[in-house]
Image (tube, rainbow, N blue to C red):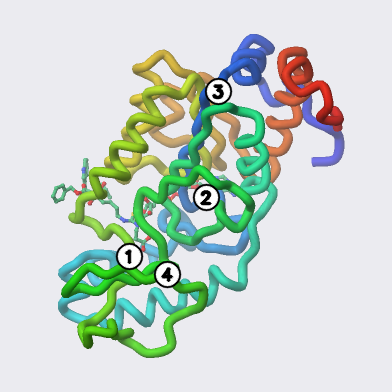
Amino acid sequence: MGRTLTASDMNVPEGVLNRIAEARSASVLTGAGVSAESGIPTFRGAGGIWEKYDFRKLATPQGFKEDPELVWEWYQLRQREMLKAAPNPAHLVIADMERHYPQFSVLTQNIDGMHKRAGSNHIVELHGSIWRLRCVRDGLVTQTDAPVVEIPPLCQCGSILRPDVVWFGEPLSDEVLDAASRAAASSEVMFVIGTSAVVYPAAALPIITKNSGGLVIEVNTEPTDVTTYADVSLMGPAGKMLPALWNLIRRTESFMKEHPFIPNR
Ligand code: BV8
């Protein structure tokens, strides 16, 4: 994508660009697609994880009860992949957005920790993190920054540890759900990036923003359920489309007025 994309190339009405730039509160909802260009596989679609693996065996409490070794082999493999990967330009733009909006939240379904590595601070991990382990007996949570060695890893109390992630059929914590719903309801704009929007309750968050009068801006390589109600849907890889969109926003009068000292690249 050589030349700089213009608002008309990206089909973003000037009025929408200005509303995005003038907003005081914003959020992004991200899914596996935002990390695809970092080399981390997505779940659905061609070459998706669920094409190769059975989510019932690997991402449910029943599957873990039946075969914790199998589940941990899979999470160890993903830890190794995620450690090798690096944040891509989409993650970096999201971290930059946090410096512009007085109220900003990253609502992510990803457990890869990429947003934090890219410099985002206000992150709500809807489905937990692959870099936290939880004791199945006393719920003690420990942080780690390296793939597990022992399979299955054991807690100091001798009980087995599980990844501190939310599996299918398990509720999100009230604290996380409250924070995410409040951020969605108070967002004047929500960017929905790289999610198929089929997993609930995460997929309900953009609907909360829309029903609260906020703008919904989608970035995806293909149409999703969000496309039906988004104000703008940019079809293309997030690592390309989001920097181009953010550049357009930074060139608006209202953005430059807001940030007179930020060089207009
Ligand atoms: C619960 C953690 C209740 C583990 C995950 C309502 C209707 C229907 C079903 C339900 C419902 N409510 C609840 C359910 C059941 C279920 C659910 O939603 N099922 C779906 C499948 C129908 N939900 C649950 O079970 C939730 N819990 O409801 O509990 C409850 C209440 C009380 C008491 C008991 C229970 C828990 C769901 C969380 C499951 N855990 N992950 C792990 O990751 O190992 S979900 C996991 O899959 C991810 O976290 C993510 O959420 C989801 C994958 O979705 P995406 O991230 O969007 O990825 P996907 O591959 O699908 O799409 C990628 C997209 O990116 C595509 O659109 C593609 O086009 C695009 N893309 C690709 N490349 C790029 C790109 N876009 C831009 N740039 C690119 N380069």
> Which badge, 4 or 1, comes first in the chain's sequence?
4
The residue wearing badge 4 is 143
Quadrant of the rendering where the C terminus is positioned: top right
Q: Amino acid at mark 2?
A: Gly
Q: Is residue 213 left or right of residue 62?
A: right
The residue wearing badge 2 is 33
> Which badge, 4 or 3, comes first in the chain's sequence?
4
| Residue count near mark 1 (Cα–Cα under 10 Å), binned few <14, some 14–19, many ≥20 | many
**Could you tell me which residue is drawn at 69 percent across and 30 percent down?**
245
| Quadrant in the rendering for residue 64 | bottom left
Does mark 2's beta carbon lie closer than 8 Å to ligand 1?
yes
Question: Does dot 3 land on a helix, a strand or a loop?
Answer: strand
> Which badge, 4 or 2, comes first in the chain's sequence?
2
Give whichever of 230, 264 is nearer the camera: 264
Q: What whole-number distance in Å separates the C-alpha atoms at marks 3 and 2?
A: 18 Å
Q: Is 194 rendered above or below residue 188?
A: below
Q: What whole-number distance in Å separates the C-alpha atoms at marks 3 and 1?
A: 35 Å
**Could you tell me which residue is drawn at 46 percent across and 73 percent down?**
144
The residue wearing badge 1 is 164
Q: What whole-number distance in Å separates the C-alpha atoms at marks 4 and 1?
A: 9 Å
Q: Nearer the viewer, mark 3 or mark 1?
A: 1
Question: Does dot 1 land on a helix, a strand or a loop?
Answer: strand
Q: Amino acid at mark 1?
A: Asp
Q: Amino acid at mark 3?
A: Val
Give whichever of 39, 262 is nearer the camera: 262
| Residue count near mark 4 (Cα–Cα under 10 Å), binned few <14, some 14–19, many ≥20 | few
The residue wearing badge 3 is 232
Q: How many marks?
A: 4
**Could you tell me which residue is drawn at 83 percent across and 32 percent down?**
4
Q: Is residue 262 left or right of residue 185?
A: right
